[in-house]
Image (cartoon, helix red, strand yellow):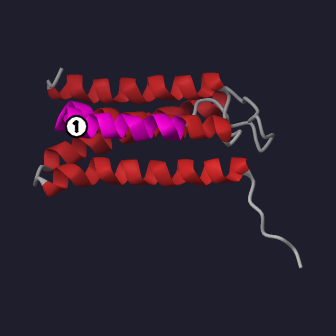
């Protein structure tokens, strides 16, 4: 009878996927709970800007993933989207939500390393892209 063992890297990958999903949903839902549609749209704009930037860069930097899966390692889209969401929570909704969001974003970013999906430079670039996306939305909205 075959065993259904899961590797540590697979567990980290699943954690990263779940954390990304939860953080994005939280960044969009928290302002809606307060009836702040603009806040939700601002968070969505930040996350989409980070995601689109990563998708635009990946074809031009064909870096192999540490696990050898493909050559779409740079930059980490998980890290970019999560830091955009976490910083959106902080910038638009306060320090309490921001601290929790950035804590989850950090864990998701680390999960990408432990899952062998990304190199350190990929994750750092993703974090920078996520931060830049949220700062860009803040500047555009006059919420510097």
The residue nearer to you, when weighing 37 against 3, is 3
Which residue is pictured at 62% across the width and 48% down the height? Answer: 12
Place residue 42 in its image quadrant: top left
Q: Position of residue 25 (x, y in %)?
A: 34, 54
Q: Name the residue that disc number 1 marks.
A: 96
Which residue is pictured at 69% across the width and 52% down the height? Answer: 10
Q: Quadrant of the N terminus?
A: bottom right
In this rendering, does residue 74 appear at all? Answer: yes
Query: Which residue appears farthest toward the right when viewing the image?
Result: 1
Q: Position of residue 119 (x, y in %)?
A: 68, 28
Crowding at dot 1, Cα within 10 Å, few <14 / some 14-19 / many 20+, comes out as: few
Q: Which residues are magenta?
A: 90-109
On whether residue 92 falls in the magenta region, the answer is: yes
Q: How many marks?
A: 1
The residue nearer to you, when weighing 142 against 91, is 91
- Report whether 93 appears left or right of 120: left
Which residue is pictured at 29% across the width and 47% down the height? Answer: 27
Which residue is pictured at 76% across the width and 33% down the height? Answer: 64
- Report whether 6 appears left or right of 107: right
């Amino acid at each position: 009878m075959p065993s259904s063992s899961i590797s540590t890297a697979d567990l980290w990958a699943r954690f990263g996927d779940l954390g990304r999903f939860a953080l994005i949903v939280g960044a969009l839902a928290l302002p809606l709970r307060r009836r702040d549609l603009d806040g939700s749209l601002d968070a969505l704009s930040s996350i989409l800007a980070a995601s689109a930037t990563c998708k635009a860069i990946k074809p031009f930097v064909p870096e192999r993933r540490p696990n050898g899966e493909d050559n779409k390692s740079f930059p980490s889209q998980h890290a970019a989207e999560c830091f955009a969401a976490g910083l959106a929570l902080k910038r638009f909704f306060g320090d309490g939500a921001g601290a929790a969001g950035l804590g989850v974003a950090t864990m998701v970013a680390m999960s990408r390393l432990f899952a062998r999906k990304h190199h350190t430079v990929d994750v750092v670039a993703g974090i920078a892209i996520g931060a830049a996306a949220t700062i860009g939305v803040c500047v555009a909205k006059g919420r510097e």
